[in-house]
Amino acid sequence: MNRLMRLAQLAPLIALLAGCVSRIDDGSEVHIRYEYWVPLLQFAGGVALIVACFAITWRIRWGLLLGGLVCAGLPAPMTALTGAWVSADGFVVRYGGLGMLTTTDLKYDNISGIREITKKALGSRGQITYRPNLRFQLVSGGTVDIPIANDVMRQARQEILPRWRARQ
Protein backbone atom coordinates (compact mmCIF):
# COMPACT_ATOMS: atom_id res chain seq x y z
CA MET A 1 0.00 0.00 0.00
CA ASN A 2 2.87 2.35 0.77
CA ARG A 3 4.30 2.02 -2.76
CA LEU A 4 0.89 2.70 -4.26
CA MET A 5 0.64 5.94 -2.28
CA ARG A 6 4.08 7.02 -3.53
CA LEU A 7 3.06 6.36 -7.12
CA ALA A 8 -0.16 8.31 -6.58
CA GLN A 9 1.87 11.25 -5.29
CA LEU A 10 4.16 11.14 -8.33
CA ALA A 11 1.30 10.97 -10.84
CA PRO A 12 0.69 14.77 -10.97
CA LEU A 13 4.39 15.39 -11.55
CA ILE A 14 4.50 12.85 -14.36
CA ALA A 15 1.39 14.42 -15.90
CA LEU A 16 3.00 17.87 -15.75
CA LEU A 17 6.12 16.66 -17.53
CA ALA A 18 4.23 14.71 -20.20
CA GLY A 19 3.10 17.56 -22.44
CA CYS A 20 4.80 20.82 -21.62
CA VAL A 21 5.75 22.22 -25.00
CA SER A 22 5.79 25.90 -25.88
CA ARG A 23 4.93 27.00 -29.42
CA ILE A 24 5.74 30.61 -30.26
CA ASP A 25 4.52 31.89 -33.63
CA ASP A 26 5.71 35.36 -34.62
CA GLY A 27 4.19 35.23 -38.10
CA SER A 28 7.28 34.34 -40.12
CA GLU A 29 8.83 31.71 -37.85
CA VAL A 30 7.58 29.14 -35.35
CA HIS A 31 9.77 28.30 -32.35
CA ILE A 32 8.94 25.05 -30.55
CA ARG A 33 10.63 24.04 -27.29
CA TYR A 34 9.90 22.75 -23.82
CA GLU A 35 8.63 25.27 -21.29
CA TYR A 36 11.40 26.81 -19.17
CA TRP A 37 10.17 25.25 -15.95
CA VAL A 38 10.44 21.64 -17.25
CA PRO A 39 14.28 21.40 -17.21
CA LEU A 40 14.39 23.49 -14.04
CA LEU A 41 12.04 21.05 -12.32
CA GLN A 42 14.12 18.10 -13.52
CA PHE A 43 17.29 19.74 -12.23
CA ALA A 44 15.64 20.60 -8.90
CA GLY A 45 14.50 16.98 -8.53
CA GLY A 46 18.06 15.79 -9.06
CA VAL A 47 19.39 18.28 -6.53
CA ALA A 48 16.68 17.22 -4.04
CA LEU A 49 17.82 13.60 -4.39
CA ILE A 50 21.41 14.64 -3.77
CA VAL A 51 20.43 16.58 -0.65
CA ALA A 52 18.21 13.74 0.56
CA CYS A 53 21.09 11.28 0.28
CA PHE A 54 22.78 12.94 3.26
CA ALA A 55 19.70 12.52 5.47
CA ILE A 56 19.10 8.85 4.69
CA THR A 57 20.77 5.73 6.03
CA TRP A 58 24.11 4.66 4.61
CA ARG A 59 22.72 1.69 2.71
CA ILE A 60 20.72 3.68 0.15
CA ARG A 61 22.75 6.91 0.29
CA TRP A 62 24.92 6.08 -2.73
CA GLY A 63 21.91 5.11 -4.81
CA LEU A 64 20.22 8.44 -4.11
CA LEU A 65 23.43 10.35 -4.81
CA LEU A 66 23.92 8.58 -8.12
CA GLY A 67 20.23 8.98 -9.03
CA GLY A 68 20.36 12.68 -8.23
CA LEU A 69 23.47 13.23 -10.31
CA VAL A 70 21.98 11.34 -13.24
CA CYS A 71 18.65 13.19 -12.98
CA ALA A 72 20.24 16.63 -12.69
CA GLY A 73 22.96 15.98 -15.24
CA LEU A 74 21.26 14.16 -18.13
CA PRO A 75 17.58 14.88 -18.76
CA ALA A 76 17.59 18.50 -17.58
CA PRO A 77 20.20 19.75 -20.11
CA MET A 78 18.74 17.55 -22.85
CA THR A 79 15.29 19.02 -22.28
CA ALA A 80 16.64 22.57 -22.11
CA LEU A 81 18.59 22.23 -25.38
CA THR A 82 15.85 20.56 -27.45
CA GLY A 83 14.08 22.89 -29.86
CA ALA A 84 12.93 23.54 -33.40
CA TRP A 85 12.72 26.72 -35.47
CA VAL A 86 10.52 26.46 -38.55
CA SER A 87 10.26 29.27 -41.11
CA ALA A 88 8.94 29.67 -44.64
CA ASP A 89 12.42 28.94 -46.09
CA GLY A 90 13.50 25.98 -43.95
CA PHE A 91 13.99 24.75 -40.42
CA VAL A 92 16.56 24.13 -37.70
CA VAL A 93 16.10 21.19 -35.32
CA ARG A 94 18.24 20.76 -32.22
CA TYR A 95 18.11 17.73 -29.91
CA GLY A 96 20.38 15.74 -27.63
CA GLY A 97 22.38 16.75 -24.60
CA LEU A 98 25.73 17.95 -23.46
CA GLY A 99 28.39 16.44 -25.66
CA MET A 100 25.72 14.77 -27.82
CA LEU A 101 23.95 17.82 -29.26
CA THR A 102 22.76 17.37 -32.85
CA THR A 103 21.69 20.35 -34.93
CA THR A 104 20.09 19.92 -38.35
CA ASP A 105 19.62 22.99 -40.54
CA LEU A 106 17.80 22.37 -43.82
CA LYS A 107 16.31 24.68 -46.44
CA TYR A 108 13.19 23.50 -48.27
CA ASP A 109 14.86 24.21 -51.64
CA ASN A 110 17.50 21.55 -50.81
CA ILE A 111 14.90 18.84 -50.05
CA SER A 112 13.57 16.68 -52.88
CA GLY A 113 11.34 14.44 -50.74
CA ILE A 114 10.24 13.63 -47.20
CA ARG A 115 9.20 10.22 -45.93
CA GLU A 116 8.07 9.13 -42.51
CA ILE A 117 9.95 5.93 -41.66
CA THR A 118 10.24 3.65 -38.66
CA LYS A 119 13.68 2.53 -37.57
CA LYS A 120 14.09 -0.76 -35.80
CA ALA A 121 16.51 -0.66 -32.86
CA LEU A 122 17.72 -3.15 -30.30
CA GLY A 123 17.17 -2.04 -26.70
CA SER A 124 19.54 -2.46 -23.77
CA ARG A 125 17.92 -5.72 -22.66
CA GLY A 126 17.52 -7.24 -26.10
CA GLN A 127 14.01 -5.95 -26.78
CA ILE A 128 13.20 -4.55 -30.19
CA THR A 129 11.92 -0.98 -30.34
CA TYR A 130 10.52 0.91 -33.29
CA ARG A 131 11.35 4.61 -33.51
CA PRO A 132 9.65 7.03 -35.90
CA ASN A 133 11.89 9.24 -38.03
CA LEU A 134 11.54 11.79 -40.78
CA ARG A 135 13.83 11.00 -43.71
CA PHE A 136 14.70 13.93 -45.93
CA GLN A 137 15.95 13.13 -49.44
CA LEU A 138 18.23 15.95 -50.46
CA VAL A 139 18.61 17.39 -53.95
CA SER A 140 22.33 16.50 -53.74
CA GLY A 141 21.40 12.80 -53.39
CA GLY A 142 22.01 12.28 -49.68
CA THR A 143 19.54 11.67 -46.88
CA VAL A 144 19.08 13.15 -43.41
CA ASP A 145 17.12 11.35 -40.69
CA ILE A 146 15.58 13.21 -37.77
CA PRO A 147 14.14 11.14 -34.91
CA ILE A 148 10.62 12.01 -33.78
CA ALA A 149 11.39 11.01 -30.20
CA ASN A 150 9.64 13.67 -28.09
CA ASP A 151 6.80 16.17 -28.04
CA VAL A 152 8.92 18.98 -29.48
CA MET A 153 9.85 16.92 -32.54
CA ARG A 154 6.26 15.73 -33.01
CA GLN A 155 5.03 19.33 -33.11
CA ALA A 156 7.92 20.34 -35.37
CA ARG A 157 6.89 17.60 -37.81
CA GLN A 158 3.40 19.10 -37.94
CA GLU A 159 4.93 22.44 -38.92
CA ILE A 160 7.60 21.19 -41.34
CA LEU A 161 5.51 18.89 -43.55
CA PRO A 162 2.78 21.40 -44.58
CA ARG A 163 5.31 24.17 -45.22
CA TRP A 164 7.44 21.91 -47.43
CA ARG A 165 4.37 20.66 -49.35
CA ALA A 166 3.22 24.26 -49.91
CA ARG A 167 6.54 25.03 -51.64
CA GLN A 168 6.29 22.05 -54.01
Image (cartoon, rainbow, N blue to C red):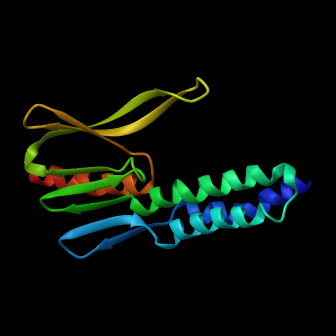
Q: Measuring 42% from the left and 52% from the top, which residue is drawn there? A: 97
Coordinates of residue 36 in the picture (x, y in percent)? 46, 72
Tell me if 118 is positioned left or right of 1 in this view: left
Quadrant containing the N terminus in the rendered view = bottom right
Vertical arrangement, residue 41 with respect to residue 99, above or below: below
Vertical arrangement, residue 58 with respect to residue 46, above or below: above
Count of marks placed on residues: 0
Tell me if 146 is positioned left or right of 166 in this view: right
Q: Measuring 53% from the left and 67% from the top, which residue is drawn there? A: 38
Q: Is 14 in front, or is 165?
A: 14
Coordinates of residue 168 in the picture (x, y in percent)? 9, 48
Outermost residue, bottom side: 26
Q: Measuring 7% from the left and 49% from the top, which residue is drawn there? A: 109
Quadrant in the picture for residue 53: bottom right
Q: Measuring 47% from the left and 59% from the top, which residue is drawn there? A: 77
Coordinates of residue 16 in the picture (x, y in percent)? 60, 66
